Amino acid sequence: MELHLNRVDYTQVGVTSQKTMKLLPPLGKKATQKVAIADHDGILTCFGMKKGEAVPVFKTLPGQKIARMDLGGAVGTPQEKIFVCSGSQVRGFTKKGKQFLTFEANLTENINAMHVCGSDLFVCASYIYNHYLDCKDQDYFLSGDKINDVIYLSSENLARPFPILACQDRVLRVLQGSELAYGIEVPGPPSVLELYNKDGGDEILYGTADGKIGVVQIGDQTSSVKWEIDNEKKKGGILCLDTYDIIGDGVNDILVGRDDGTVEVYALDSAGDPTLRFEHVLSESVTSIQGGCVGKESYDEVVTATYTGWVTGLTTEPQRAEVGPGDEVKMSKEMQSKVDALRAELEQLQVKVLQGREQYHQTSQSSTAVSAVPVFSINDKFTLCQDDASYSLTLEVQTAIDNLLLQSDVPIDLLDVDKNSAVVSFSECDSEPNGNFLLATYRCQANTTRLELKVRSIEGQYGTLQAYVTPRLQPKTCQVRQYQIKPLSLHQRIHSIDQDRPMNRLSLVGQFSFAEIHSWVVFCLPEVPEKTPVGESITFYFHNTFLGTQLEATYCKGEGHFKSDNISTISILSDVLSKEATKRKINLNISYEINDESVSHTLRMIHPKLEYQLLLARKVQLIDALKELEVHEGNADFLIPEYRSILDESANLLEEYKKQPAHLERLYGMITDLFIDKFKFKGQNVKTRVSSLLEILDNYDLNSLLDFFNDV
């Protein structure tokens, strides 16, 4: 069954956070629903549709930024009470806008996740979970990593209800009171949770920050994954989810909103597997998504809220009439009055803009003129992408972006992004005295509010990437955002490592506290929680997204142990940790255990990547010559099949080569570092032999390379 949905824009409020828009329950079976939405201005707005116009039901006064919204009510009754959280405070409103609850959670941090179920209130700050029953403290839990979302699962299949936390370390934590019952490992950092069946059931729907979706069946002691959808097309991360039967086949469909503006509808096939049935791309990130009926009775729709506050419906109601040749399209009176109202509103806005410009011009000429800097919000995300070992930098502004300046004091490569239509220009940098390795300017096209960039760093070289964002506002203003490039920037957290690999070990002993060594690990590696872990010791596992090598970090007060199958990783850690300890005037006793077998193991891991890149480079070098031969001879029939295939695939080969600048140089650099580091731990300086190593790489053969490493 084909699904056709048509876009309708309803209204716009201020900048919104994740999960801050809900549809109130309908009064009748086919009746339209009211929409409640909260924004960063602290305003809670509730509106309904009447004759195609958004009519306000109520609107609260401005206040502190609203971070989350949920609907609640007595169990078994319509969930039509609106709960919002601002800072550490939770407020409750009736469907008519009367405030009936103000509850101070007494948290030291702002609430960033909330769930309401009957008399139970669940709130989470960055690492703290609290459960209140009738506004009285019940349970408390301190999480090992940042909490992104919380949900409460109550089912006849379970002996007791379970609160579930979505945590940044790729774990769903299932709680029992104030204790951890068990953890569920998921393939990415979970960013949002929803009940798979709102009428009861033991299944949880989750979405991850790297764009994966899955359903987990929760049991009293264990869980099982029913299905997962991988993010093969590299779409944005999941910000919101909902379940609703939009197709009308009696089975709930899955509604998905992503941070790149993609809205998706997945339906379950006869085997119970999800299939993509509808996709639509909005121009900004989708912060909330709900299924229901808003615009017109009996027409179901997917209602979305975006970062800049647009409430949009994707409705099953037909929006245009099909006519034959020579026939006239007759516009209904309702549509005609709507068009007339829009024209009148547009004319009024144009007059207001002209008056505002004139007033601003007159004020600026005055001797007492005061220029106020316009304030604007930026929604930014800097994340490591596992698939291509690069960092994705996403910047979203509530108004159009004029230009973006990138500056880095560490060597990084800018990679091509298909979605990015901005024009980039590079400035020459003097890296020696000023520490500038990159200066790039992106000039954006009109009405660009979201920009996505990709950069790739070099492990061992660390510093700061700065983004200067200038919007199309008068007077001109700019905001700067800073992003840390860490020493082991291409490492990503995992749940376990392969213990059978040949490992090198680094051990530190000294007069340092648990908090101090944890701060050093945070400085060196991404995806480590800022807060010092609970307990006396901690173990983290990582893998290098570029090479596939692994790292284990175990440390406690006065002691730290690191092991990796890559000598270069151990060398970087040794250098950085020594430097950090020296800054704090702490003496370290450092010892190493070097396994020579790990070198050939690492070279074999690099081998397929290096071989592929060398072959790609050779093919690209041949393309121009082969094209000249083809032009000269009139066709390419005389070429051997290998050369003909290079010509046929020339566009794809050039595109792939362009997308991976300096890829070959990176691999050469890693092999060179491995060579230097191997002998550094033996007390030998082999930098004079690097030129011989590069000659072998230019005429690459794995066995010759292994022999060279062993013969020195």
Image: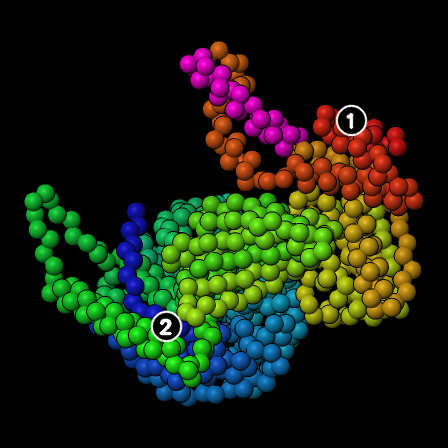
Quarter holding the C terminus is top right
The answer to whether residue 626 is magenta is yes
- Please name the amino acid that badge 2 sits on: Val
Mark 2 vs 1, N-terminal side: 2
Q: Which mark is residue 703?
A: 1
Q: What residue is shown with label 2?
A: 13
- In this rendering, is residue 620 above or below 147? above
Residue drawn where x is 85% and y is 36% of the image = 688
Residue in front for this viewpoint, 446 or 501: 446
Residue drawn where x is 68% and y is 41% of the image = 666
Q: Can the viewer see residue 343 in this picture?
A: yes
Q: SS for tag 2?
A: loop
- Please name the amino acid that badge 1 sits on: Asn
Residue in front for this viewpoint, 314 or 375: 375
Which span is picked out in magenta?
611-635
- In this rendering, is residue 335 above or below 441? below
The location of residue 439, given as percent across then percent down, is: 59, 53
The answer to whether residue 415 is magenta is no
Q: Can the viewer see residue 227 in this picture?
A: no
Residue in front for this viewpoint, 548 or 118: 548
